[in-house]
Image: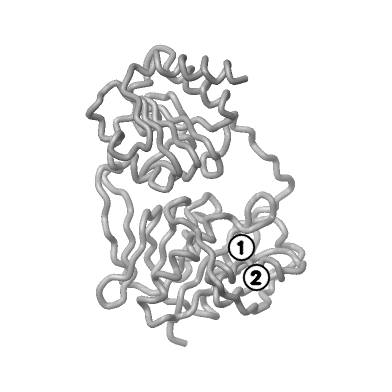
Amino acid sequence: MEPNGILIYAQKDSECGIHPVVFELLTKARELKQKIWNQKIAVCLIGERKNYDETISELGSYGADEVIIVNDDRLKEYNKEYYSEIFVQIARKYPPRIILIGATIEGKEVAAYTSTKLETGLTADCSNLDIGENYILLSTRPTFGGHLTADILCKTFPQMATVQQNMFKAEKTEHSANAIFDWIDTDKIEKKIEVIKTIKKTIGTKDLTTAEIIVSGGSGACRDNGFALIYELACKLKGAVAGSRSAFEKGYITKSQQVGQTGKAVSPKVYIAVGISGANQHLTGIKNSGKIIAVNKDKNAPIFKYADIGIVGDLFKVIPELINEIDKEG
């Protein structure tokens, strides 16, 4: 069978719904589909036995033509060996031209296993996708420590890419999907790991990918009590704390809090950039933010060109004043 269409791995989220990155990939796939002879978009969903009518409808509303479901009571919780091998078998049975997977921890595991088993290339952590010459997938990703981006052509099939969350805006369309219920013999899958118990880790700050308000610090905040002020402001606003690459390298934030090409892409309603100059690699990570508020003492900082509200001033004076105003409002 000739490779045809786009296959997307449908990761489930912690609430047993579909992870938001899947809808973003479907939206982008609709654009790519028009450039490869309108080939179909298929989604592979792996899970326990239950009614999937609502999920099929939701995936269809974002552009899926087919939802291939493999359901078994042993597949309720994610298991690297089960899920990865099942996805590989589905990719072999319904060979796609392109495979897209969200660049989450789970997605990266499945993608690495899949590319190895299918003996094909994989472009990881992409920030954009397009179709280049000869209808080849063109994947854009950061390189040289995030200072540059590279456009990579995948010349092996299926063409594979993982994409960071919040790179594309998920948009619904009037569309419906057909459901295909397939069966994979899980007894024949070699399983070396048994999931005994799942414990959620508390990281002390909100998840950046779902936060509506983010207060983020750059190199200007990496001294004295700069990040203490950022944490206090975020707490007052019930938001999440983030930072630039320099803030991570200096130890003020964890890797999971880094925003930018080499960190996370975010899409909050409000992004407050404190002491961040606005280098291109950071702006890539906040391009889908609703409103951007910038605080920087350098009136020529590039961040002001992209900010909806710009405050020129010393953050060590501006942020305490903002906190006081919030306290006054109660």
Question: Is 54 drawn above or below residue 228 in the view shown?
Answer: below
* Residue in the picture at 26% in, 35% down: 302
Mark 1 or mark 2: which comes first in sequence?
A: 2
Asked which secondary structure carries label 2, the reply is helix
Question: Is 323 drawn above or below residue 206 in the view shown?
Answer: above
Where is residue 134, by image quadrant? bottom left
* Residue in the picture at 42% in, 48% down: 288
x and y percentages locating residue 128 in the rendered image: 36, 58
Residue type, label 1 = Tyr
Left or right of 313 on screen, residue 192: right
* Residue in the picture at 33% in, 53% down: 141
Residue under pointer 2? 57
Residue under pointer 1? 83
Residue type, label 2 = Ser
Pick the front one: 287 or 124: 287
Distance in Å between CA atoms under marks 1 and 2: 22 Å
* Residue in the picture at 60% in, 73% down: 67
User: How many residues crowd mark 1 within 10 Å: few (<14), some (14–19), many (20+)?
Assistant: many
